[in-house]
Structures are given as C-alpha cells and as structure tokens.
C-alpha cells in the first residue's frame, strides 16, 4: 500500500487538474490511515469537479470518513451538509453522508436521507444497511430489523455486518434465528470471521445453548485480540503518568474564569457499567441535552500536544497534555462540539473511556459535573468480554487482560477521587436498580438540577442512542443484567480468581 500511495502522489502531481488522480490519491491515503492526506485529496477532487455536478457531490461526500477518523467532526458535518445542499447526491453519496451524520451524533438528520435513498434505489443493499443503523440509533427497532434483513437479501457479498447488527436488536428463538446460515458463512477476512463468531455467540446465548455460545465467543475473542492487541504494561505506564503529572496540588485552587456555553456533564466508567442508563435518566430532564459518546476531548487534547506517537495516551502525551493551558483545550472542545448544541443549559458527553481524562476535564471545565459509574466487576467485565468493540477496548478480549485493565481502572479512578473529592459523583448501578427513586433523586440533586418526574422514566426519553445498550435502555429500569455472568460461572473462573487475588469482589 505505501507503494500505491507513492504512485498516486506522483499521478496527482503530474495531473493536478484531474479529479480521478486526486480520487486515487485519497483512496490510497485512506487505505494506510493517512486521514489528513486522504481528506485533502478528496477535497481537491471535489474542487476540480464541475460545480453543481454529481461528481462533485461524490468527491465531497468522500471527505466525511477521513475527517471523522481524524477527529474533525465539525468539519465533517459541514462537508456533509454541503453535499445535501447541492442537491446532486447519488445513493452512494447519501450513504456516506448518512455515515458521517450518524457517527457525529445526528442520526435524526440522516434518517430522511436514507429513506430517500432506499425509495430512490430499493435494490441498494448498502443503503438499507445504513437505514438500519440510523433506525437503531433513533429507537425504531422494528424498522431497523426490516432494513437489516433487506440488506441481507440484497447484498452481493456475505452480509456479515448486517447479521452482526441484526443479532443485537432482540432475543432470538429456536424457531427464529440465523445460526444455520452463520455456521456455513464464508468469511473473507479475520474481522468478518470475528464478527460472525460474536454474532453466533449472541444467538446461541439467546437460545440458552451456553456451551455452543462460549465456544463461539472463544473463537471471536481470540481473533479480536490479534486484530486489536493490548498491553497491560503500557496501560500501567499511562496511569502512572496521569498520577505523576496531575497531582493533588494542581486541583482545588479557585478558578475565576467565567463559563462559556452550557454546563458540561461527563459520564465515565467501564463500558457496560450503566453509563448509557445514567445518560438517559439525565437526558429525560427538560434542561439537559445528551450529545452521545464523543471522542472529542481526547482527540483535541492529543492534537494539541503535537506528539506524534502510535499510542493515543503514551506517557509523553500525558506529560505534554499537562503543559497545555486547559482553557485552550476547553475552547477547542467547545468549537468541535458547537454544531450539536440546541441551547439547553446542560449537555452530556457520555464516553466511558473519558475516565482517563477526568482530571484534565476538571481543569478545562472547572464547573463540569463528572459522574463515575460503579458496577459489580464480574457483570461489567463479562458485559465487555461478550461484545465486539471495533477499534476500542483492546483489553476486553482475554480474561487476564480484563482483570489487568480493571486493576488499572480502579487505580486511576482512585487517584481522581482523591484529587477531585466531591467533584466526582459516584453512582452504583446495583444501588440504582434496587432503589431507582432514591438514587435518581440523589443524582439529579448532585447535578444541581431541580427534580423532574420524567427522570424516573428514562426509557421514555427521546433522543438517539448509538451504543450497545441502544435496545436495552428503551425498556424500564430492570435487574435483567444483574448477575448475568453466572450463566458462565465455570468458564469465567480464571477472571474471577484473578479479581479475588487482586482484592476485588468477585462473588
């Protein structure tokens, strides 16, 4: 691929007015994750295409994915809206625009585009798949199922992703599942094989066939671990860097800067620990807007450090972040997220892994509300282990890695609690489920909000949910997930014993 990129660069240099040459360069750059170069090449291709043409819309729509991957979400949304405004987008361009808008937290804006695309071209499998993704995020589960099934019917290649997403929309039965098809599906890549294995786990688990489900999970997790390697030693270095460069002495001093924009609520914790439920509880309040899972804080921080490293949070990145003016980080974050705001005085950023930045978030936004979720480690860790997270949470594919990450997670959260004190609001998922009325009232009061009855009915809250909990959180608060790990108690004994040896609860 580097050779192809070099050849494409030469072609673009030799024919700087050629749309095709810039398109080839953008495609080659995207293939090696050179996102900035890819976006610039697609932008040049669009600039050289005839104004108001379908070709320009096609090239412009290609900018979205590299912009999103490079963390330039506001630019990606602006670019997508230019495509729509031009009125010349073909079906493939609408699909790309829908991807941009949905991943930017605007699935409601993408929905009419995908409805138009499937009506205009009802045989376009990718359009149906995109419609399914949008409907899942907006809560129209029945339409999402219909769309994914249509994508499967029309797909010219093995529709692995459609089956994968379809599996998590509802519980499957002995007389209604896709196991025979999945068991014989031919996969072209390790990632496809990985997705099929996780899909089979979900459907076998629904049927209560735990031995078959576990076998599939082992196949999937072993593949995922190779695709997304993770190092406990590297995470230990990162945690040590946070503790070194953000000691207690940096906190507690009064900050006289006036707050700009809405008050920020950051919800952090392990994935599958109840962060989405807390988001929905607060989003049910009339004064609160949920923005979804934003990678923005970490992206702008990393960009501002100007450290070029393969690791997102290498110790040198943390050290450089400690030298930044937190107000500059706040300004950059506010700029990147401004397009999402609807004017409400409180907004939620719910990205579980923002726990890494909790101290820096407090310095950037002194009045930020930081909520940390706590859940029984066996339930939280098994909840992560049984899911395939694409390009995230590389620690979640091995029982030893799960335990090691949990140890580092508790270590870092303990540090943030010691320096933030009451500035870190702790919520137990089990306590919330056992006594929702009391815990929800406590949480709302801790956020400085007047109580509203709607917060007791988070399943009725409007707004998109694009996480793995998209279906679950549309049900009333329940204890379905409490102790779910016990179905696989014997298979999870290595994790349980590691947690016990580390001094954590595991019963």
Image: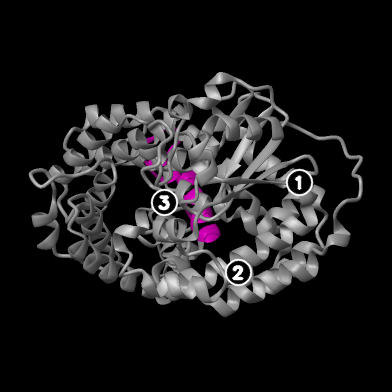
Asked whether, in this view, residue 254 is left or right of residue 218, the answer is right
| Residue 249 image label | none
Asked whether, in this view, residue 203 is left or right of residue 353, the answer is left
- Inter-mark Cα distance, 1 to 2: 21 Å
Q: Residue 317 in the image: state x and y as whole percent.
A: 70, 68
Residue drawn at point x = 37 percent, y = 29 percent: 111
Q: Is residue 46 magenta?
A: yes
Residue at the disc numbered 2: 408
Name which of mark 1 and mark 2 comes first in the sequence. 2
- Magenta region's main secondary structure? helix
Asked whether, in this view, residue 246 is left or right of residue 85, the answer is right
Q: Residue 227 in the image: state x and y as whole percent.
A: 38, 71
Residue 445 vs residue 364, the one in the foreground: 445
Residue at the disc numbered 3: 19
Image quadrant where residue 399 sits:
bottom left
Residues in magenta?
35-60
Name which of mark 2 and mark 3 comes first in the sequence. 3
Rendered-image quadrant of the N terminus: bottom left
Q: Does the magenta stretch include residue 498?
A: no
Residue drawn at point x = 37 percent, y = 39 percent: 472
Rendered view: 333 above or below 385:
above
Neighbour tally class for label 1: few under 14, some 14-19, many 20 plus, Cα within 10 Å:
many
- Secondary structure type for disc 1: helix
Image quadrant where residue 223 sits:
bottom left
- Inter-mark Cα distance, 3 to 1: 53 Å
- Inter-mark Cα distance, 2 to 3: 49 Å
Residue 189 vs residue 263, the one in the foreground: 263
Residue 229 visible at all = no
Residue at the disc numbered 1: 423
Q: Residue 375 in the image: state x and y as whole percent.
A: 52, 52
């Amino acid at each position: 691929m580097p050779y192809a990129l070099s050849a494409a660069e030469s072609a673009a240099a030799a024919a700087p007015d050629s749309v095709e040459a810039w398109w080839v360069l953008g495609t080659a750059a995207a293939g090696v994750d050179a996102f900035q170069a890819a976006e610039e090449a697609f932008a040049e291709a669009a600039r050289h295409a005839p104004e108001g043409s379908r070709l320009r819309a096609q090239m412009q729509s290609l900018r979205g994915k590299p912009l999103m991957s490079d963390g330039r979400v506001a630019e990606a949304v602006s670019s997508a809206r230019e495509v729509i405004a031009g009125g010349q987008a073909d079906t493939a361009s609408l699909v790309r625009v829908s991807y941009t808008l949905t991943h930017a937290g605007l699935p409601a804006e993408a929905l009419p585009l995908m409805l138009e695309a499937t009506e205009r071209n009802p045989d376009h499998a990718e359009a149906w798949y995109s419609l399914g993704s949008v409907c899942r995020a907006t809560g129209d589960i029945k339409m999402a199922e219909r769309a994914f099934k249509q994508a499967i019917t029309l797909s010219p290649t093995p529709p692995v992703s459609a089956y994968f997403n379809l599996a998590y929309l509802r519980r499957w039965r002995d007389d209604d599942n896709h196991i025979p098809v999945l068991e014989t599906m031919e996969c072209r890549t390790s990632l496809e094989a990985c997705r099929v294995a996780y899909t089979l786990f979900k459907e076998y688990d629904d049927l209560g066939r735990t031995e078959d489900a576990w076998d599939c999970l082992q196949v999937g997790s072993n593949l995922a671990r190779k695709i997304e390697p993770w190092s406990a030693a590297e995470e230990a270095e990162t945690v040590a860097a946070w503790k070194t460069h953000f000691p207690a002495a940096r906190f507690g001093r009064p900050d006289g800067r006036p707050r700009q924009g809405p008050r920020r609520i950051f919800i952090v914790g392990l994935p599958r620990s109840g962060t989405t439920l807390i988001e929905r509880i607060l989003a049910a309040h009339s004064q609160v807007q949920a923005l979804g899972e934003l990678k923005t804080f970490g992206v702008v921080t990393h960009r501002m450090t100007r450290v070029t490293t393969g690791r997102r949070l290498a110790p040198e990145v943390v050290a450089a972040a400690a030298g930044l003016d937190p107000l500059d980080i706040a300004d950059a974050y506010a700029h990147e997220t401004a397009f999402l705001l609807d004017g409400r005085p409180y907004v939620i950023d719910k990205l579980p892994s923002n726990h890494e930045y909790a101290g820096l978030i407090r310095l950037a936004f002194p009045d930020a509300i930081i909520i940390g979720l706590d859940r029984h480690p066996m339930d939280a860790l098994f909840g992560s282990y049984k899911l395939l997270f694409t390009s995230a949470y590389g620690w979640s594919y091995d029982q030893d890695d799960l335990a090691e990450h949990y140890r580092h997670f508790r270590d870092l959260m303990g540090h943030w609690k010691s320096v933030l004190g009451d500035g870190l609001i702790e919520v137990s998922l089990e306590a919330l489920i056992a006594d929702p009325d009391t815990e929800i009232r406590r949480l709302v009061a801790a956020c400085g909000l007047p109580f509203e009855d709607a917060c007791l009915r988070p399943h009725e809250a409007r707004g998109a949910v694009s996480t793995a909990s998209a279906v679950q959180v549309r049900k009333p608060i329940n204890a379905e997930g409490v102790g779910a790990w016990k179905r696989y108690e014997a298979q999870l004994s290595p994790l349980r014993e590691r947690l016990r040896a580390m001094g954590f609860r595991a019963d």
